[in-house]
Image (cartoon, helix red, strand yellow):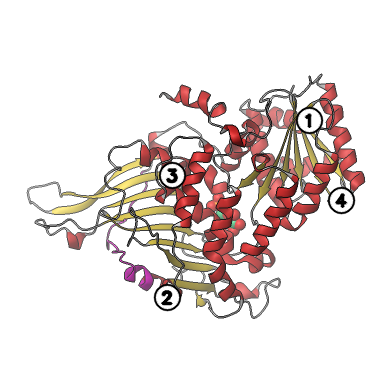
Amino acid sequence: MDSGEWCVEKRGSFRNESFRDNDNVPETGCLSIIVLGASGDLAKKKTFPALFNLYRQGFLQSNEVHIFGYARSKISNNDLKERISGYLSQGKENAEEVSDFLQLIEYISGGYDSEEGFQTLDKAIYEHEISRNSTEGSARRLFYLALPPSVYPPVCRMIKSYCMNKSDLGGWTRIVVEKPFGKDLASSEELSAQIGELFDEPQIYRIDHYLGKELVQNLLVLRFANRFFLPLWNRDNIANVQIVFREDFGTDGRGGYFDEYGIIRDIIQNHLLQVFCLVAMEKPISLKPEHIRDEKVKVLQSVVPIKDEEVILGQYEGYRDDPTVPDNSNTPTFATMVLRIHNERWEGVPFILKAGKALNSRKAEIRVQFKDVPGDIFKCKKRGRNEFVIRLQPSEAMYMKLMVKQPGLEMSTAQSELDLSYRQRYQGVTIPEAYERLILDTIRGDQQHFVRRDELKVAWEIFTPLLHRIDDGELKPIPYKAGSRGPVEADDLLRKAGYVQTHGYIWIPPTL
Ligand code: BG6
């Protein structure tokens, strides 16, 4: 199938009939995008810039789209536009586009449980729909909740009661929600039940922005469209898999939020676990979103309970200096843990998930390490193992570390790599921001890259026992220096799990 066909299918028939959110789902016509929490950080830094990029690429047409910002702050339309405009890529060349885009935005102030506020919002949306001569069934309403989850239930109730296209124009209504979806299994299930009473699953888009990253989106293609990998991707050949997230800055003014959640809820239970699913799941029977998500759920269900001795927690020194963090905080800012999958493909292969703040570098990658070559006539073992590395960020790349003859007269071996660095290979191609892609998916009604309710539930089942033991103070983080690799105990755990580090080999991203 060529890429053109793929796109056509993606927009249309990939959607599973039983998960359609409306029998008559229009994908064109008047579109209202309502950003709730419009004056907040997420909206300013991610949502509006993503909308702007979609607009400038022609995915949002000014004759169809109107954007409503809604928040409690009593600010004017212009105040909101001023706040946003600094985050839209601006240069002389696109000043006009920025100004045209800002024209599409209308700000409405109101409380998150205010009937009056949501009635005013509904009226404004309806007026816009009428002004665009919308025909019956063609009005599309996308509500983006850039809000703390505590207000999801009242906001969803308000949307359901007052903004659900009761008019003759009724097309579809979709709701986009952001993590954290709860703090553990019970709270997440409660939240899901509250939202689930109001909206059907196909109307709910749970964003995990890692699913919008270019190389995360590439994982299924890599795995299932390449003959190379088919026979190798299993316990017979793979020694261990690492999924790593590192940041070289601390909680940076978000200490209050972070301390409530910690690194496992902030990064591992969602972002890294989603990547884990795509690396470990079986081949779906088709590319329909429900088929893909079914496989993700299955592999999550095969994860065995995490053992205490396979978890190392850390907290960077200085974390508690943040005035919003309690002096006795037990919250981990670093964690390394081993997930084990009880199935035919992966029995015995450790999946090491590692995430940390205030470390010595910033990167996210998947590192698949292969077993040693049997009958090692070249004595390669001491030089290091084959690895396949997928660098999610920065400098998107995939490279395969392999053994070659050292060029020259001597017959000696050396580690080298086959390197597919995106910046070099795809010059001139702009890699879209994760949010851009995901918002476009919500408009098109494609739920493939969103987390389904049952998937979320199993994800919490895996981590809740561990999280409760940390919350109760039974497991304590080890202090580590900001700017370091994290606690040395984490490297010991890696070794125990069977990871063999290659000393003296460093992959250097090519420069143009
Ligand atoms: C967010 C976390 O979900 O992801 C942040 O809350 C983290 O703590 C961020 O910094 C990382 O995202 P990215 O895309 O910069 O890797």
Which of pointers 2 and 3 indicates the residue nearer the eye? Answer: 2
Distance, label 1 to label 4, CA atoms, is 24 Å
Quarter in which the C terminus is drawn: top left
Sequence-first disc among 1 and 2:
1
Asked if 411 appears above or below 141 in the picture, the reply is: below
User: Dot 2: what SS?
Assistant: helix
* Residue underneath mark 4: 111
Give the amino acid type for the residue marked by disc 1 in the picture: Gln
State the residue position of label 2: 309
Under mark 3, the amino acid is Glu
Where residue 103 is drawn, which disc sits there? 1
In the figure, is residue 344 to the left or right of 413? right
Look at the picture and state if 344 lies above or below 425: below
Q: Counting residues from the N terminus, which is met first, the one under dot 1 or under dot 4?
A: 1
Look at 46% across and 51% down and name the residue there: 298
Picture quadrant of ligand 1: bottom right
Label 4 Cα neighbours within 10 Å, binned few <14 / some 14-19 / many ≥20: some
State the image coordinates of residue 58 (x, y, percent, origin top left). 63, 25
On the image, the x and y values in percent for residue 359 come to: 49, 65
Look at label 2 and name its amino acid: Glu
